[in-house]
């Protein structure tokens, strides 16, 4: 069982993992999700997955799922640097996923889910 | 096509007026004259461009009368309506390099005329201006004139014609932080193997992507008499008066805030807040003393633990990891702090 | 930023939560603080306790400023 | 371990009633290949097309590029664990159909990417504008899930490449090259004065459309391990990666890995090429730590003096790259890393998502955000209907005159991070 929290803005993650999973669903943008993760890191949570998972760049997908520990306390420097760099990277890419057709949107959800799925497999070992 | 019009800037030495003893030579416009290194430039320009005027100015004069000299020279350049402005090359001459960088940047920014200069990479002017104007990388003495002009002239022509400028290694300018693509002669793997062989042999090699560098500054002496010291507060946590009167942006701020806290004993939710977008603002908004400890320092001021809390504080929104932009601001307000007789600084970051 | 202040000739103490970052940016006198969103406070405490905590940290900062250092030094007791 | 590569130069590809390879001309029997593709009942139909260098042709969206090869002597077969049995490859003799490629195209997901222009300004950014390309576009049966579709197309490409390679089995190669490395002790004795060098290859392994397979094993489920450098020439590593066209490694790049090739060129002269180390680029941070720890450990254990580390992909792998570099350097082993950059359209942004002072020797494949205009082509193989959706494209992508305004990101192989291309940046 996962000891941690999955922060996501991807409805498919909620759907796949069901109501009992430690999922925090936020209806927000890709960057806002990274910022929500950053706020938790500031409180002492550690990243368990890379915030720029996937080669689909920020701006090309609206969805992002990140696993963090529930830890409180000292700030983890590595997590902090990863999340800061990820937030900075958002600015480098053009926004265009808001113009996707519905079918493409579903593809984006699926890809984000499969990236998370791989990480969950590692986390649950 | 008509020849491109070029204005050339040189110092008293290259104008053969004299050395250090003539460095106070004021700025002078010589219309229709090609002086010193201008000859070599003209040769390289061929039919494509000509130097229509030369500005001569002493290095001491320029640096000691920075504002006036800059303004005067801008007028001179403007009057000649050039297509491109060339300064130097300055090689390793420090004040000449700073003058070339200053005036080339000013011509480009204020007159909108493309500008280029040249100097040795360790010339202080290089670091100061490499992100503002193209600076051709030269050798450290005038013995490298031929080589310098060979790079300077073609780059000036391209700039004058408005042609796209290639990567630094192609054009010969000092890297300016803007990454530009180009095709190498060998593929990447072959370059990597060569680089590794050099690195293994302890020979010099050149990385294609330098990592951000961090320099160090030696610590200043400790404060001897805290009870009479003037302490200033600086924060990168974005604490601003409520309503953010200066409109400090939440990230990548283009300016910093200077705020008067004379008579302010405590920062409250009603009076101060954070403009920083890099952390959860709830706690700082509720009580900004959590980032900028004004309340405690006022107590200590009263108790005589410190001499005085400086009446101005400075605020930026620099994240811990993004330091580059804040550097310029800090250099600026540090001078103000010094001028105001501050003895020591407490800098708080989130 | 801290480096530019130091470069100007003013002794400076950097109060920050993630001290390794402070090391990276070149601070010489470093005082570790509580948390990123509230470096000099702790909302979980009573206001008076919180102020006392802040006072302790600022005192530490003043001590740092009164201490000669010859390189990067973290004042964390 | 010694492998002899026999290159058969392909000068032309033609469709014909009978498949054969004669005088450098590859005659392709479409019907026979179609049968091979349709062995998989999840594929509804397939179309074949030929694209030649210099033609006004655009292939998109490209999924994989594969070079046909055939094992003539020695154990195992091409693509072990996937098409051939899982025997260890990399020795004996292999024939290569040089100068051509099988290109699989087709839309797996809506935002997929990958452009190969056979002429015009885009052509110089992709290495596959120089190969004679047999392009196959596969249509899935209705309702097929993306996972299954990706797998079906991936495997169909390999089956076709192997079938074509088979045509070269009894053809005398135009050129023969021998690649040989030796065991640890043997190498030390043979080259006592040469620095011991290995190649650390990072494999994309993040999930669907981001996977790489080693002898058929999904790389994200592997620990860092060692290969003879010749194994990859027989297809030991294949691509299941179709996102980030510019810096993903198509199977063709694995078969012709340029770092392996260029280290072999110096082997026994200026260095001793000890082995290839492969490691992955997982999403889970603990996996990253473990994999990079193991890589560094092996570098030490093998008493290496230096390594070249190559990357695949954007963002997340920057972290693996820096971890590998830092940890390997900390073992006293010198590194050169190969990456590419995302410096923004203006080239002013921070290029990598991670950095460390230990990474003092970097080779770059260029800025993938740089914008390029691709003029209209007379013929499109695949489909353009997604172009506004592909990575690096924007709303204004498709211009009224039919040209595309895109970032280099969308071009297959443009900023390859194994150093396969000449593009760079400063």
Image (spheres, coloured by chain):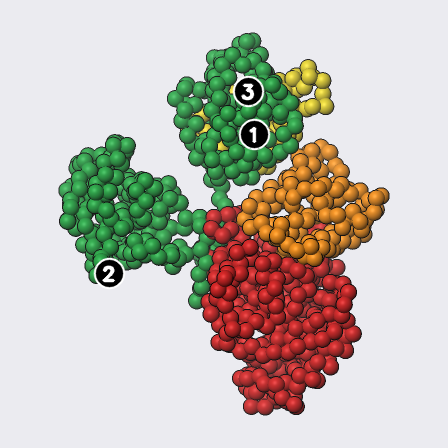
Q: Residues within 10 Å of mark 3 (few under 14, many from 20)?
A: many
Residue D391, quarter of picture? bottom right
Q: Which mark is residue C62?
A: 3
Q: Residues within 10 Å of mark 1 (few under 14, many from 20)?
A: many
What residue would you read off at disc 2?
A: B1
Q: Give the secondary structure at mark 1.
A: loop
Q: Identify the chain drawn in red.
A: D
Measured Cα–Cα span from mark 3 to mark 1: 27 Å
Left or right? Give the position of B278 relative to B119: right
Q: Position of residue D167 (x, y in %)?
A: 65, 86
Left or right? Give the position of C33 relative to A16: left
Using the image, determine if residue C58 lies above or below residue B26: above
What residue would you read off at disc 1?
A: B275
Q: Give the secondary structure at mark 3.
A: helix
Residue lying at the far top of the rendered structure: B303
Q: Which mark is residue D296?
A: none
Q: Residue at x 52, y 56 (%)?
A: D396
Measured Cα–Cα span from mark 2 to mark 3: 69 Å
Q: Position of residue A62 (x, y in %)?
A: 65, 49
The residue marked by circle 1 belongs to what chain? B
In the rendered structure, are the residues bearing label 2 and label 3 in contact, judged by CB atoms less than 8 Å apart? no
Which residue is more in the foreground, D56 or D370?
D56
The residue marked by circle 2 belongs to what chain? B
Q: Identify the chain drawn in green.
A: B
Camera-near label (1 vs 2) is 2
Measured Cα–Cα span from mark 1 to mark 2: 54 Å
Q: Give the secondary structure at mark 2.
A: loop
Q: Residue at x 55, y 50 (%)?
A: A94
Colour in which the image shows chain C: yellow
């Amino acid at each position: 069982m996962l000891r941690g929290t999955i922060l996501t803005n991807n409805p498919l993650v909620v759907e796949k993992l069901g109501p009992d999973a430690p999922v925090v669903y936020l209806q927000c943008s890709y960057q806002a999700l990274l910022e929500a993760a950053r706020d938790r890191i500031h409180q002492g949570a550690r990243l368990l997955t890379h915030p720029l998972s996937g080669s689909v760049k920020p701006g090309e997908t609206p969805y992002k799922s990140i696993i963090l520990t529930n830890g409180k306390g000292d700030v983890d420097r590595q997590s902090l640097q990863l999340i800061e760099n990820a937030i900075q990277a958002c600015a480098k890419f053009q926004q265009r996923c808001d113009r996707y057709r519905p079918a493409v949107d579903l593809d984006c959800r699926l890809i984000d889910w499969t990236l998370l799925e791989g990480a969950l497999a590692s986390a649950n070992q | 096509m008509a020849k491109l019009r070029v204005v050339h800037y040189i110092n008293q030495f290259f104008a053969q007026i004299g050395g250090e003893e003539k460095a106070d030579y004021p700025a002078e416009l010589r219309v229709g004259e090609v002086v010193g290194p201008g000859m070599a430039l003209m040769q390289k320009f061929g039919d494509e461009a000509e130097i229509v005027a030369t500005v001569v100015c002493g290095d001491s004069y320029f640096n000691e009368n920075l504002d006036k000299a800059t303004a005067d020279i801008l007028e001179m350049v403007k009057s000649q309506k050039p297509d491109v402005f060339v300064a130097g090359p300055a090689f390793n001459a420090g004040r000449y390099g700073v003058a070339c960088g200053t005036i080339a940047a000013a011509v480009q920014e204020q007159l909108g005329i493309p500008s280029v200069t040249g100097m040795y990479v360790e010339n202080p002017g290089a670091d100061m201006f490499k992100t503002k104007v193209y600076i051709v990388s030269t050798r450290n003495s005038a013995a490298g004139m031929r080589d310098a002009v060979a790079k300077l002239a073609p780059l000036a022509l391209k700039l004058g014609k408005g042609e796209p400028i290639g990567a630094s290694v192609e054009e010969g300018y000092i890297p300016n932080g803007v990454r530009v693509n180009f095709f190498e002669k060998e593929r990447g793997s072959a370059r990597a193997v060569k680089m590794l062989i050099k690195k293994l042999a302890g020979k010099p090699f050149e990385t294609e992507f330098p990592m951000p560098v961090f320099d160090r500054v030696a610590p200043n002496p400790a404060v001897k008499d805290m009870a009479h010291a003037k302490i200033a507060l600086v924060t990168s946590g974005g604490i601003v008066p409520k309503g953010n009167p200066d409109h400090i942006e939440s990230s990548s701020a283009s300016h910093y805030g200077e705020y008067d806290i004379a008579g302010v004993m405590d920062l409250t939710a009603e009076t101060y807040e954070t403009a920083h977008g890099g952390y959860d603002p709830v706690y700082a908004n509720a009580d900004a003393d959590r980032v900028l400890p004004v309340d405690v320092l006022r107590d200590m001021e009263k108790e005589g633990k410190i001499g005085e809390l400086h009446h101005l504080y400075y605020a930026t929104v620099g994240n811990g990891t993004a330091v580059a932009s804040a550097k310029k601001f800090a250099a600026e307000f540090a001078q103000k702090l010094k001028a105001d007789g501050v003895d020591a600084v407490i800098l708080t970051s989130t | 930023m801290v480096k530019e202040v130091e470069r100007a000739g003013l002794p400076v103490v950097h109060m920050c939560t993630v001290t390794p970052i402070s090391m990276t940016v070149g601070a010489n006198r470093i005082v570790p603080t509580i948390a990123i969103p509230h470096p000099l406070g702790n909302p979980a405490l009573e206001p008076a306790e919180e102020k006392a905590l802040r006072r302790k940290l600022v005192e530490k900062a003043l001590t740092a400023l009164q201490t000669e250092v010859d390189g990067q030094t973290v004042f964390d007791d | 371990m010694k492998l002899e590569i026999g290159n058969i130069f392909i000068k032309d590809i033609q469709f014909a009633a009978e498949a054969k390879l004669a005088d450098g001309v590859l005659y392709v029997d479409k019907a026979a290949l179609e049968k091979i593709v349709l062995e998989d009942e999840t594929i509804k139909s397939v179309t074949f097309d030929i694209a030649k260098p210099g033609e006004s042709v655009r292939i998109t969206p490209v999924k994989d590029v594969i070079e046909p090869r055939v094992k003539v002597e020695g154990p195992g077969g091409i693509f072990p664990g996937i098409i051939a049995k899982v025997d260890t490859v990399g020795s004996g003799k292999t024939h290569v159909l040089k100068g051509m490629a099988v290109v699989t195209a087709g839309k797996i997901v809506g935002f997929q990417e990958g452009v190969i222009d056979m002429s015009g300004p885009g052509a110089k950014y992709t290495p596959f504008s120089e190969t004679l390309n047999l392009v196959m576009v596969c249509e899935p049966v209705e309702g097929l899930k993306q996972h299954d579709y990706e797998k079906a197309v991936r495997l169909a490409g390999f089956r076709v490449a192997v079938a074509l390679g088979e045509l070269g089995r009894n053809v005398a190669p135009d050129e023969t090259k021998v690649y040989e490395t030796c065991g640890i002790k043997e190498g030390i004795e043979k080259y006592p004065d040469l620095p011991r060098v290995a190649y650390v290859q990072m494999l994309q392994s993040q999930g669907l459309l981001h996977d790489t397979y080693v002898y058929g094993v999904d790389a994200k489920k592997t620990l860092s391990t060692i290969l003879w450098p010749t194994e990859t020439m027989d297809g030991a590593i294949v691509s299941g990666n179709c996102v980030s066209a510019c810096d993903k490694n198509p199977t063709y790049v694995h078969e012709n890995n340029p770092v392996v090739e260029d280290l072999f060129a110096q082997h026994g002269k200026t260095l001793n090429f000890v082995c290839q180390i492969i490691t992955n680029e997982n999403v889970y941070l603990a996996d990253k730590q473990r994999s990079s720890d193991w890589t560094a450990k092996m570098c030490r254990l093998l008493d290496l003096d230096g390594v070249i580390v190559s990357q695949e992909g954007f963002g997340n792998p920057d972290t693996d790259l820096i971890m590998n570099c830092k940890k390997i350097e900390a073992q006293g082993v010198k590194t050169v890393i190969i990456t590419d950059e995302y410096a923004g359209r203006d080239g002013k942004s921070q290029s990598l998502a991670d950095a460390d002072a230990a990474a003092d020797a970097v080779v770059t494949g260029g800025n993938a955000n740089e914008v390029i205009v691709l003029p209209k082509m007379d013929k499109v193989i695949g489909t353009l209907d997604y172009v506004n959706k592909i990575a690096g494209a924007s709303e204004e992508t498709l211009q009224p005159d039919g040209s595309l305004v895109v970032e280099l990101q969308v071009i297959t192989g443009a900023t390859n991070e194994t150093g396969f291309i000449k593009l760079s940046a400063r």
